[in-house]
Amino acid sequence: MRKIPSTMATQHPDNASAPYWHERPYLSVNAELEECFRCYSELGIQEYNWDWEGKFVDEAVIDRLYNAYGDFFQKHPLGKDFFLTFRIANPRVEKHHRVGRAFMVMLTAAHLARQFNFYSPPLFEVILPLTETSEELIDLKEAFRELVGLKHKLLSLNGYLDDIEMIPLFEQVEKMMSSEEVLEGYISLHKQKFGYKPAYMRPYCARSDPALNSGLVPTVLAIKVALSSYLDFEKKEKIRLYPILGTGSLPFRGGLNPHTVSRFLKEYKGIRTAVIQSAFRYDYSQKEVIGAIQKLNSQLPKSTPKHLNTREVRLIREVIPLFTKNYRQVIEKLGTFINEIALQVPRRRERHQHIGLFGYCRALAKIRLPRAIPFTACFYSLGVPPELIGMGRGIKEAKESGLLSIVEQTYEYLKEECLDAGYFLNHENLESLAQTEPAFRLVLEDVCILEKYLGTRLGPKDKSHKEHFRLTSLVYEKYKRGENIQELIGQTGVLRKSLG
């Protein structure tokens, strides 16, 4: 059995500060090659996600890595000790040509590695974002196999990498809770079409996009249901599952940073691979980062999920809509407002924009939303952490329905994460926003209820929080005057140790 990595670095652009090895926070496509190498060699991260979804990408990645760092990869082979995993574009969402290009890179990389006596194949897994059905996984696997079969005297692709493993990425609350059905369908189709079952699978649960669409509590509860269902799946199918969780640093996007590793290991028992995004790597000291990664690498292989019984799953399914509707009631009314501010969130990577030839975005109901990082940065920079949206009213309705206990026992660190987010609340901004935007009156109600539930007033506690409060007041004042707030948003991100 191949080595299963415990930590996966991604190119998510949520860092507020410059990388320790770079002169500025913005990373070009060219700089990502060095980033990849440093994640392996200096930080000890075992896997790097080379992202083809919604961004520009260097397609000569293997050629360049071997050429620049050949000695390292002879000693620590790609595909054996360290891993480079492509997150490909979903053909249902982005243009088909990007999948073909990714597949060709994988095939030619295997040929290159063999030719120059590196371990081969260096690439053999792909992540499919926005996975919804087992058929789309099988279709991509079949497409790859057909591509391998191409033969010409000038170009022969077979014999180096004949097959790939699929990593389904589930990015919606309901899709995560029913993800075992997609896995079961995939296993059945795989055996039917190829004559055997895969030896293992790595189901990948997102944290950012489900939270963006449904709120914090529904996302966490859905992940717990998914992890529990994977236990039953393993027993039924006799196939090992190694779940991945896509966590950012702030609670809304996962709450994993160098200061919260112990809490993360307890909250998300059963996760085998933790995502280490840019803010984790670059907004904390290098010593803290390396220590935290070492702890994840050593502890995650020992992690086992908590099993939920039928009654608990039923109660979770009943309570999720209470939080979702209260969250969406706010977000669906603020589409224009959110997008206006999100446009001023500093860019950190060469991503495609929402418009133009490669237009790409997320959507909720009938409104177009920015991606999760600028979305989160937008609210935090105003002093209104998105964790709080819908939270108070959700808790109130859950309590009235007799369902609050299932939330508390399943989401073990609910109160702690609400407090962590609450340190960045600017009461004055929220009260002012509530006077002009009716949706923010609901958020003000959420905060009042949540403060009673927690038994404390939310707001800044230490010097850094108070400086964040001051800057968010400036952000709001400048926004009202129509002035540029990009630099201020960046400054608030440095204080909270994550852009969004």
Image (cartoon, helix red, strand yellow):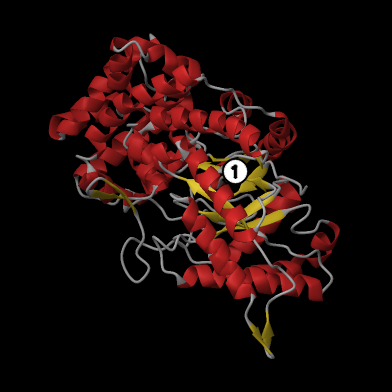
- Dividing the picture into quarters, in which one does residue 63 lie? bottom right
Evaluate whether residue 16 shows in this view: no
Q: In what quadrant of the picture does the C terminus appear?
A: top left
Q: Position of residue 337 (x, y in %)?
A: 22, 45
Foreground of the two, 194 or 246: 194
Q: Decide: is 202 above or below 196.
A: above
Q: Position of residue 112 (x, y in %)?
A: 74, 74
- Dividing the picture into quarters, in which one does residue 404 lie? top left
Residue shown at 42% from the left, 27% from the top: 421
Q: Secondary structure at mark 1?
A: strand
Q: Position of residue 27 (x, y in %)?
A: 54, 59
Badge 1 crowding class, 10 Å Cα cut-off, few under 14, some 14 to 19, many 20 or more, is: many
Foreground of the two, 324 or 435: 324
Residue shown at 52% from the left, 56% from the top: 137
Q: Decide: is 7 above or below 231.
A: below
Residue shown at 34% from the left, 35% from the top: 214
Name the amino acid type tagged 1. Answer: Ile
* Residue that numbered label 1 is attached to: 276
Q: Decide: is 111 above or below 460.
A: below
Residue shown at 35% from the left, 22% from the top: 319
